[in-house]
Image (cartoon, rainbow, N blue to C red):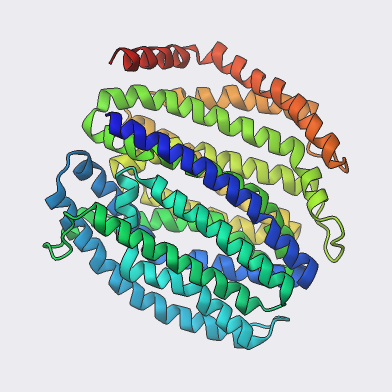
Amino acid sequence: MAAKDTRIRRNLASSLVYQVVLISLSFLLPRLYLENFGSEVNGVLSTIKQIFTYMCLLEAGVGLATTQALYKRIGENDYKSASEVLAATNSYYIKTGVVYLAIVLVIAFCYAYVVPSSIDSNVLFFIVILNAIPALFSYFVQAKYRILMEVDGRKYVINNSETLVQLVSNAAKILVLLLTDSLVLIQLVYCVVALCQLIFLYIYAKRRYKWIDLNAKPDFGAISQKNSVLVHQLSGMVFNNTDIILISLLCDFKAVSVYSIYCIFFSQMQNFIMSIVSGFNFALGQMFHTDRPKFDKVFNVYETVYVTATFVIYTLMAVFMLPLIQIYTTGVNDANYTNIYLVFLFVIMNLLSNGKLPVNSVIEYSGSFEKTRMHAIWEMVINITVSIVAIIYLGICGAILGTIAALIYRSLVMIDFSNKKVLQRNPMCTYRVWIVNGVVFALVMAIFFVDTFSNMSFVRLLLNGVIHSIWIMGLYLLANFIFNKSVFYTILELYRGKKQG
């Protein structure tokens, strides 16, 4: 247990460092793109990025199915069975890599020579190819080991290597951008650095897990739910990436640039939250299968703390995000980046998306992918249908409204299924946490709307942020102490038990 606690601490610490570095660096390049190339080029590059995110769907199903299959096996040190699962995963990844390569070549040709843009066709072709090379290496060589490392609680190794990748690649990109205007060279720099990271992780895993036998008889049955998992992952991809592609088709690339700038702020926060959760997610996944009574107790605490923290984060973003975007886009006049409704809709969308993560994790731990497949399908249908209609009439904001409509449906059915079918408890346990925090959120929004601190200098904004963050966090803490008091007693009980143990 001590070793597991150590890995959790390392995972959390490395996640924190990685996200601080990532957040700090992620704002530099888009700003330089806007200054050097304008909003349209920034929009084109953002669209290409989203297309490749969609390409990850090729491995999404087997990746999560393998994770779920390995939780119990690694938790019980059943290395023979784990090798059989990894052998099946490896077989699937090799086949997927071949398909991925073929699709990349088609996309590179079509996007470079068919879809009109202001970027040179040959440049676009090579940008697409260079984007694809690290993923190809991952499919054929490294991806299965990465999954094993995460299940085994060694996410900190991945985080540390990615921190180094971000520091080196972003510094090199900025240097290239300042010295030349070569988009191909900028992408090449990242490609080389990313490949070095993947090679390092491969070598680390081969030395750490010498028991792996990829020649073992593949246990395809262990990952038989990969197609059902793929439906869930497809739904997630639709939620995360459809908006930009629909905006590029129904609006223009300048609108994509506006949307992508907002995404920078919100996606970095989402990545921060996800990286922290992934630091101890492996422990919860193993506990679900090895010590269910303790899992039920710990999960109740986790859900309350996580949902409350999510509300705190996005409440502060709702209040202070607009002036930050105004400061960030100062001097960029070829598109309007100030939109109060877009800020508020982004906050609601991310609250719903991140807030449902605990109940979503329960589905993953239990492997209930096939039983909830229709939920994911209906979420996709609602998202795409509402988004297309809303974008036509409302532009960028319509894309967010479509996603919010789908998230409301998915959140409700996931809360109901996870509580009733898996946790065997009343869904009000989850709804109570949401209602308490939702009321506090509404109260703060009644005091401060998203444009309260609009056009404020950075220093004044920082001072106001510090002052108001204190009482807003205190208000959330007080509300949850009053209405979810049992969680605080459980935390104290778990702490005393751990100390005595």
Measuring from the top left, give residue 166's x and y in whole percent: 55, 57
On screen, residue 204 above or below 132: above
Q: Is residue 472 visible?
A: yes
Image quadrant holding the C terminus, namely top left
Measuring from the top left, give residue 2's x and y in whole percent: 29, 29
On screen, residue 86 above or below 107: above
Residue at image x 44%, y 23%? 429
Residue at image x 81%, y 56%? 329
The quadrant in which residue 348 appears is top right
Badge count:
0
Q: Is residue 414 visible?
A: no
Residue at image x 17%, y 56%? 83
Q: Nearer the viewer, residue 308 or 440?
A: 308
The quadrant in which residue 205 appears is bottom left
Measuring from the top left, give residue 350's x and y in whole percent: 60, 43
Left or right position of 293 against 35: left
Image quadrant holding the N terminus, namely top left
Left or right position of 78 against 121: left
Left or right position of 360 against 265: left
Measuring from the top left, give residue 36's x and y in whole percent: 78, 71
Q: Nearer the viewer, residue 199 or 487?
A: 199
